[in-house]
Image: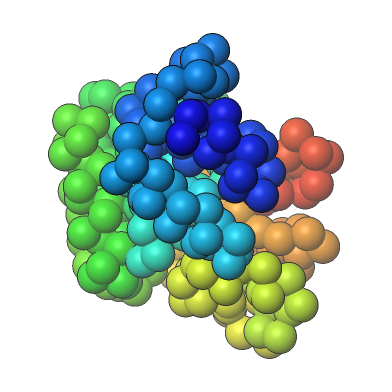
Amino acid sequence: MTYQEALSASGIDPREARLLLAALTGFSEAAVLAFPERELHPALQASFAGQVARRRGGEPIAYIVGHREFYGLELLVNPAVLIPRPETELLVDLALERKFSTAVDLGTGCGAIALALKWSRPQARVVAIEASAAALVVAKRNAVKHGLDIQFRHGRWLQPLDAERFELIVSNPPYIAAGDPHLGDLGFEPAAALVAGADGLDAIKEIARSAPGHLSPGGWLLVEHGIGQDRAVRDLLAAAGLEDVATWPDLAGIPRVSGGKR
């Protein structure tokens, strides 16, 4: 069976089929396109068929191939962690617009935000906190993969920080309301990284309440949130005593990140 025959028989989105075949063979997607007549080894045919079946079942491509790019870094991912989204890069962009030498990422997951910050600011001290031990394993593997010195801590939100203060606190916490119909499309990803109570704000409420006590004077808290939550999040940040509270839209124009300064 040739590459072209395998792709044609897959029955899934052609681009996704090429991505799977490229990852499986070790060639680039361009090479898969350029040499459609290349023979696919029988052992790889079986593997490709298995991957295609997983994709037909709705499993995300990132979990099937085992990695996802974020902020120029290829990150290992598995079902223990949320798959990094392009819109979350806005959170990193906004963080890097601010001066900081110490930063903490709450609910780091695969480590995407913390690693992007450390990669962009090598001299900064970056702490990453995660409640899931399985997710923390993935984050640590990604730090080793990219040779980035991150201080990882196991725990819920700001609890592992004791009395420490930071110039920057960032988080992409769960913010989907329980029962939201969109959860049906996210069944392969960890619910704990997605759902936050009846209104989707439980995690952000806890972070907003605790973060000011861990911010240095002039330090910033930046949090990602969902569509339609920006006003409620700004109110939470203002009620916590933060100043210069604002919201920033992602590339689609959706209010995506809100933050405030101590």
Residue 141, above or below 109: above
User: Residue 19's x, y, as percent?
Assistant: 52, 35
Residue 259 in sight here? no
Residue at 83% from the left image edge and 40% from the top image edge: 253
Q: Image quarter for residue 204?
A: bottom right
Q: Give whichever of 164, 65 is nearer the camera.
A: 65
Q: In the orientation shown, which residue stands out farthest toward the front?
A: 1
User: Residue 122's x, y, as percent?
Assistant: 26, 24
Q: Image quarter for residue 56?
A: bottom right
- Horizontal side, residue 70 vs residue 165: left or right: right
Residue 259, above or below 69: below
Label tally: 0
User: Residue 141's x, y, as percent?
Assistant: 20, 47
- The chosen color scheme is rainbow
Residue at 50% from the left image edge and 61% from the top image edge: 54
Residue 225 in sight here? yes
Residue 156, above or below 170: below
Residue at 55% from the left image edge and 57% from the top image edge: 55
Q: Give whichever of 216, 258 is nearer the camera.
A: 258
User: Residue 260's x, y, as percent?
Assistant: 60, 49
Residue at 58% from the left image edge and 67% from the top image edge: 57
- Horizontal side, residue 87 vs residue 229: left or right: left
Q: Give whichever of 233, 82 is nearer the camera.
A: 82
